[in-house]
Image: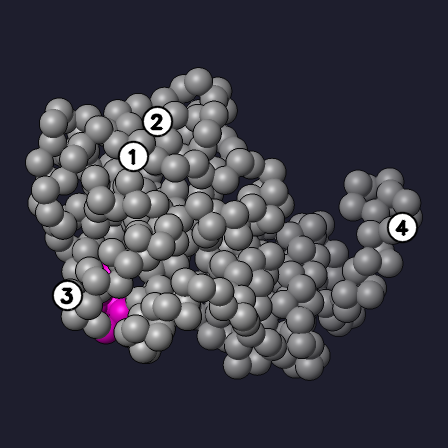
């Protein structure tokens, strides 16, 4: 089964120069305006479909608490953002859902690398009388994650977790989704990511772009946690300053070992568990050696000498 299509982002562009929106928001509300705007962008980046749903009271409370401002101030700022067109005024005024076309435009390079269309503006069939209170005209709401892939209507009682949502390879197949709190991620994956990012930051370098963030996500999804930690240790001992160096170590291990092996122990003892050979000490190849080996005819397919 292929990996489920990802429609969240761990990273979004934060420009060093600001336009009219930030000048007005920060000028009127100071640091509160600045904090809410960028905390809101973080929440939208982490939410499936990149829209933030304030219809549930807990999600609305989470937003202004996360920004460390009062509910009244948050409401004033978001109303102003809607008035200026920084967020979609129709979705906010009718449904208390926050969506920004400009935010999606900033993520287009990310989705181009993923070879998929970015999420499109969601379409709802429920009107709201106030934040945190849901009063449906009817029970269903249609959400469009991608412009060519509509999801089936969901009801208020749907409890399908975001991590369990699966999409068929057939783009005409529909599935069910609920918009849970944007901070919700599988506990084990979140814990591993925190450890990995902390080790990289302290020993190698900071995660500075979406490519590196996606690379870390791929490690966590496809490799044992101890592999990742040991690869970071080896890179640190080599005084590496690039996350790609860690990836090179991991890819070399993947090409030679099974996931339940411990490559660092095998190589330290001079044994290769896959073919039972014994010999002298084997160190892990450097990135240059790994790339050189890969360019050798027959490397990795059993045809080389």
Which numbered marker is on residue 72?
3
Q: Earlier in the sequence, mark 3 or mark 4?
A: 3
Which residue is identified by label 1?
177
Q: Is residue 224 magenta?
A: no
Above or below, 163 against 36 in this view is: above
Which residue is identified by label 4?
296
Is 112 or 204 nearer to us in this picture? 112
Q: How far apart are marks 1 and 3 (CA)?
A: 31 Å
Residue 26, image x, y percentages: 35, 73
Crowd around label 3: few <14 · some 14–19 · many ≥20 (10 Å): few
Q: Which of marks 4 and 1 is nearer the N terminus?
A: 1
Which range is magenta? 63-68
Crowd around label 2: few <14 · some 14–19 · many ≥20 (10 Å): many
Which mark is in front, 1 or 3? 3
Q: Which of marks 2 and 3 is nearer the N terminus?
A: 3
Q: How far apart are marks 3 and 4 (CA)?
A: 65 Å
Tell me the SS state at disc 3: helix
Residue 22, image x, y percentages: 41, 67
- The answer to whether the residues at label 2 and label 1 have Cβ atoms under 8 Å apart is yes
Which residue is identified by label 2?
151
- What residue is at 39 percent from the left and 59 percent from the top? 41
- The answer to whether the residues at label 2 and label 3 have Cβ atoms under 8 Å apart is no
Q: Distance between the residues labelled 2 and 1?
A: 8 Å
Render colour scheme: one colour
- What residue is at 38 percent from the left and 25 percent from the top? 150
């Amino acid at each position: 089964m292929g990996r489920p299509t990802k429609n969240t982002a761990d990273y979004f562009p934060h420009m060093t120069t600001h336009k009219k929106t930030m000048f007005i928001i920060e000028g009127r509300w100071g640091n509160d305006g600045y904090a809410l705007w960028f905390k809101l962008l973080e929440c939208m980046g982490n939410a499936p479909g990149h829209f933030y749903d304030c219809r549930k009271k807990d999600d609305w409370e989470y937003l202004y608490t996360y920004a460390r401002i009062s509910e009244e101030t948050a409401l004033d700022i978001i109303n102003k953002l809607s008035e200026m067109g920084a967020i979609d005024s129709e979705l906010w005024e009718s449904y208390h859902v926050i969506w920004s076309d400009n935010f999606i435009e900033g993520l287009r390079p990310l989705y181009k690398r993923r070879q998929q269309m970015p999420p499109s503006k969601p379409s709802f069939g429920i009107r709201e009388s106030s934040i945190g209170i849901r009063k449906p005209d009817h029970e269903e709401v249609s959400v469009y994650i991608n412009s060519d892939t509509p999801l089936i209507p969901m009801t208020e009682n749907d409890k399908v977790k975001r991590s369990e949502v699966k999409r068929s390879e057939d783009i005409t197949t529909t599935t069910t989704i609920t918009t849970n709190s944007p901070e919700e991620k599988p506990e084990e994956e979140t814990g591993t990511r925190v450890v990995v990012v902390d080790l990289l930051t302290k020993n190698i370098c900071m995660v500075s772009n979406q490519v590196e963030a996606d690379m870390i996500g791929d490690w966590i999804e496809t490799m044992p946690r101890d592999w990742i930690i040991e690869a970071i240790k080896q890179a640190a001992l080599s005084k590496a300053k690039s996350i790609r160096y860690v990836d090179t170590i991991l890819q070399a291990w993947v090409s030679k070992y099974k996931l339940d092996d411990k490559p660092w122990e095998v190589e330290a003892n001079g044994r290769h568990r896959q073919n039972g050979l014994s010999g002298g000490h084997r160190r892990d190849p450097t990135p240059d050696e790994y790339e050189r080996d890969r360019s050798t005819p027959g490397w990795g397919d059993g045809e080389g000498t």
